[in-house]
Image (cartoon, rainbow, N blue to C red):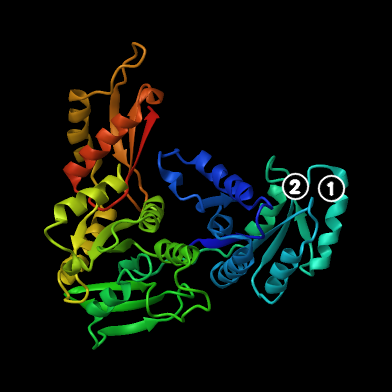
Amino acid sequence: MSNIVAIVGRPNVGKSTLFNRLVQRREAIVDSVSGVTRDRHYGKSDWNGKEFSVIDTGGYAVGSDDVFEEEIRKQVQLAIEEADIIIFVVDVEQGITPMDSEVAKLLRKVKKPILMAVNKVDNAMRDADAVEFYNLGLGDYFTISSINGSGTGELLDALAEKLEDAPEEKDELPRFAVVGRPNAGKSSFINALIGQERFVVTDIAGTTRDSIDTKYNRFGFDFNLVDTAGIRKKSKVKEDLEFYTVMRAVRAIEHCDVAILVLDATRGFEGQDENIFWLAEKNKKGIIILVNKWDLIEKETNTMRDFEAQVRKEIAPFTDVPILFISALTKQRIFKAIETAVEVFENRKKRIPTSKLNDTMLEIVKQYSPPAYKGKFVKIKYCMQLPTPTPQFVFFCNLPQYIRDPYKRFVENKLRELFDLKGVPIVIYFRQK
C-alpha cells in the first residue's frame, strides 16, 4: 500500500511543475508506455527505494476568481483528509499572500507531516528572501526551483524519511474494489451483493482509513470487498468534486487485486471513468467494467454492442477487458459480475511454464518476425515470464532497440489469446540476450 502525497498551494506557485518533476523521474525508469500519462494529476514516484503516489491538486481548480478561493480551500481540506503527507508550495517572488496564510491556517491544525517548499529560489538573494516564510508558523522550509530541479533532492530525502513502510499483505483472499464516479450506482451494486441481510463475516474498519473492507462468503466465493461508496463518513466537501472521486479511487485501487469499475449507462463512458480506468491499468490491477442502469436505456437507439464498441474504443489499446451489462436495482447479472472478477483475479496470478511459453511463442515469432529495420533482422531466441506478482514477460533477442510498438502489441495480443489473460494489464520487455 503506497503512501499518498498531495501537493497543495494557491494557483501559479509551480505545483504542476514540481509534480511533473517528481513523476517524470519515475516514468524515465520504467519503460515509457504510450498513454500512461493520460491523467495529468496523478502519478507514481519513488525515492531511495520507497514508492509513493503523488496527487497534484492544481489541475482540479476551476471557476472564476471569486469561486477560486473557495475551490482551493476545499481541495486543501480534501488533501488534508485523504493524503498521508502534504507538500505545501509557496512562491518566493510573490512572498506571503493572504491565500497562503489561509492555507497555512488550515495546515497548522493537522497532525500529518507537512513539508513546505519555497519555489522559484534560483539564486542566493532569493534564498535570503525565503526567510519570511517562517512567519506562516509551519516551521522549517525547503528552498527549491521546480523548473531546474535544484533543492528537490533535499525535499525528497525528507519526504522519504516520513513515508511509512508498506505493511506486508498477509491476506490471501482476493480484494475487489468497487470504483466509479459518484451516482454510478456503486452503493446499489454493493447492497445488491450483500442483500439487506448482510452476509458479513467481519467488518475490518479503516484499513485504508476511508474505504471499509467487508469480507464476504457468498456464491461459493470468499473475497474482500473494498468499498469506496456508501460505507464511509460523508465528507464535509461537496460530493461532486472531481478531485474527490480521484482521491478515493487512488486509495481503493492501490489496495486491491481487481478494480470493478461501475459506469452509469445513461451517461456513457466519461472522462472521469477513463481516469479511473487508466489509474487501475497503471497500477497493474485486474479490471472489469460494469455498465449499470442498462434497464433505463432505450434499446432501439442504443444496443449493447454499440455501447461496448464505444467503451473499447476509449480504452484502446488495452481492450481485453470484460464488460458486463448489469442492473443493481433488479440484481441482473450481479452473480456473473463476481464470477468474472474472480476469473480476472485468477488470470492476474497465472504462471506459464517457460517450456510451454517458448514452444508456443517462438513458433509464432518465427512465422511473424518483427519487420526488418534499416536492413537489420531481429531474431527472438527465448522468452520467459518474470517472477513478478502480475504477468510480465521478457523476450530475448539480438536487436531489441529495433522492435516497435505495433509489434509489441502483436505479441501481447497473441499472449492474451493463447493464455487467457483477460482483464489483466501485462508488461512485455525485449532485452538483449
Q: Position of residue 275 (x, y in %)?
A: 40, 55
Front one among 114 and 327: 327
Residue at position x 62%, y 46% in the image: 17
Mark 1 is surrounded, within 10 Å at the Cα level, by few (under 14), some (14 to 19) or many (20 or more) other residues, namely some
Label 1 amino acid? Arg
Mark 2 is surrounded, within 10 Å at the Cα level, by few (under 14), some (14 to 19) or many (20 or more) other residues, namely many
- Circle 2 residue: 120
**Local SS, label 2:** loop
The answer, for residue 351, to whether it is visible in the render is no
Is residue 387 toward the left or the right of residue 296 in the image?
right
Label 2 amino acid? Lys
Residue at position x 83%, y 55% in the image: 130
Front one among 205 and 101: 101
- Circle 1 residue: 126
* Mark earlier in primary sequence (1, 2): 2
Q: Position of residue 63 (x, y in %)?
A: 56, 60
